[in-house]
Amino acid sequence: MAVLVTGGAGYIGSHTCVELLNAGYDIVVVDNLSNSSAESLLRVTELTGKEFEFYPISLNNRPDMEDIFRNHKIEAVIHLAGLKAVGESVSVPLRYYHNNISGSIVLFEIMHAYAVNKIVFSSSATVYGSSEQVPITEDAPLGATNAYGRTKFMIEEIMRDLHVSDPTWSIALLRYFNPIGAHESGRLGEDPNGIPNNLMPYITKVAIGELQELQIYGCDYETVDGTGVRDYIHVVDLAQGHLKALEKIMTTSGVEAYNLGTGQGYSVLEMVTTFERVTGRRIPYRITTRRPGDIGMCYSDPTKAERELGWVAQKGIDEMCIDAWRWQSSNPDGYQDEDTFDEVHNPKLIVM
């Protein structure tokens, strides 16, 4: 029996694969590599000493997805695949709705056909929208302010309807806050295409000299220094949260949402000064206008995850910054894998 990991070559996915393999799970990975790297999966095997099968396909490719379920005994799914840039989603919403929602529906239909009804879903704190409640609990009103967040909200609602139609479904909705950091080895990390959309990779690319300065979007929020406040969580802590959620769904049925965050908010300027302090690198920055869809303050109340999953974030903000810089300084050009998969002609890759 295996766990299917969709989006397993991505930033969160690759770290989750490491934790799954180290915990003794067999995995099968699906990722279309549109915003990820096959090289990350080779490094997953390097770090764990374990091999697994990888399929470079889209979830919307129904025939190939059905082949995976036909050829593997899939016991549960960790569903991370999806486009994820908030700003881009505002500019090209239809691409986000088609990719994220249509792909998820294909996945759910095939799961149903093969009697696989256990799934951990990669949701997002963006489903809370401009919440006036901080810290945010799982029962806060939902109301995303951008297309990316709305795709996550809609998929959550689809999964709730699935459970209504068949109560044997066991579903964990993991609402991430802001993952940063990298594997402590420096071999896995965040490798965005082009100019980063997220704060930490933007900071690290300025620190290494690839970008001249950090752009800070807005300084007039009602926060400690006017810049946006977010709940930053180490990506390894986040990956371990998936294992705890997986353990939960294997023995229960129902639908439950869980915040995965630290419960502590930091402003953009606080993140910049912390990074400068722990790395010794200066980060020049420039204040510019707010981005469409952004909100001022967002941090979690993670006590439900502690109570029901036995999960608590372990790593602090200093460690997040240090690990992010170790990854960036060790991999100044990211994964550099232009031909990693092109040379493989079989429709699947056994990562060894």
Image (tube, rainbow, N blue to C red):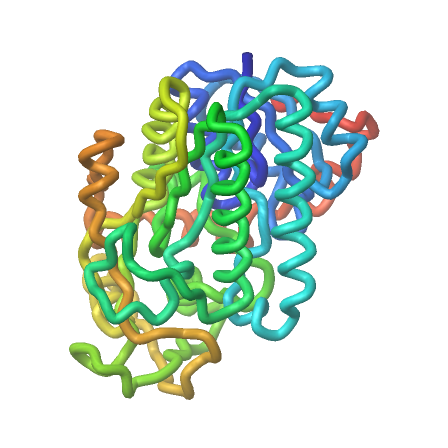
Which of the 4 image quadrants contains residue 312?
A: top left
Q: Nearer the viewer, residue 27 or 258?
A: 258
Q: Residue at x 59, y 65 (%)?
A: 194
Q: Nearer the viewer, residue 179 or 309?
A: 309
Position of the N terminus by quadrant: top right
Q: Position of residue 139 (x, y in %)?
A: 28, 52
In this picture, residue 293 sits left or right of residue 317: right
In this picture, residue 27 sits left or right of residue 134: right
Q: Nearer the viewer, residue 86 or 112?
A: 112
Q: Residue at x 50, y 54 (%)?
A: 152
Q: Residue at x 29, y 50 (%)?
A: 138
In this picture, residue 298 sits left or right of residue 307: right
Q: Nearer the viewer, residue 17 or 68?
A: 68
Q: Residue at x 48, y 30 (%)?
A: 17
Q: Position of residue 328 (x, y in %)?
A: 43, 53
In this picture, residue 7 sits left or right of residue 180: right
Q: Does 86 appear above or below 303?
A: below
Q: Is residue 45 visible?
A: no
Q: Position of residue 195 (x, y in %)?
A: 54, 68
Outermost residue toward the front? Answer: 165
